[in-house]
Image (cartoon, grey):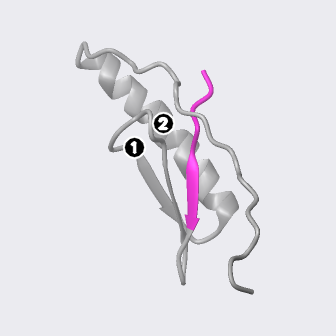
């Protein structure tokens, strides 16, 4: 399964979350580290859902970018 992961840069680190897996987050000092930690977090999250007998959400969230012209420039 492929889950969408959102990465955000903070002043001193990166954070990440998967919208289709509420509560599944990771932080790291670099983007590469955060991606590796998020991969582990998703696997751990899914394992916990299965052990609890809860359904594993199907990947459903999509992302895209939209280009806009600056207003008033």
Q: Quadrant of residue 64?
A: top right
Q: Which mark is residue 42?
A: 2
**Does 56 sit left or right of 68 as displayed?**
left
Residue 30 left/right relative to 69: left
Mark 1 lies on a secondary structure that is: loop
Q: What x and y, as percent, mark residue 49?
A: 31, 23
Q: Position of residue 57 (x, y in %)?
A: 41, 21
- Span of residues in magenta: 1-8
Residue 51 in the figure: left or right of residue 38:
left
Seen in the picture, residue 52 relative to 69 is either above or below; the reply is above
- Disc nearer the start of the sequence (2/1): 1
Which numbered tag is attached to residue 24?
1
Magenta stretch secondary structure, dominant: loop
Q: Which mark is residue 9?
A: none
**Residue at 52 percent of width and 41 percent of height:** 40
| Among the 4 quarters of the image, the one containing residue 21 | top left
Q: Quadrant of the N terminus?
A: top right
Residue 52 point in image, percent of width and height: 23, 19
Residue 40 versus residue 4: which sits nearer the camera?
4
Q: Is residue 5 magenta?
A: yes
């Amino acid at each position: 399964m492929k889950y969408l992961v959102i990465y955000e840069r903070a002043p001193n680190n990166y954070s990440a979350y998967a919208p289709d897996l509420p509560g599944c987050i990771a932080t790291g000092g670099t983007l590469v580290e955060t991606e590796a930690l998020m991969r582990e977090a998703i696997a751990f999250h899914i394992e916990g859902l299965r052990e609890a007998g809860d359904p594993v959400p199907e990947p459903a969230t999509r992302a895209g970018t939209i280009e806009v012209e600056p207003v008033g420039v």
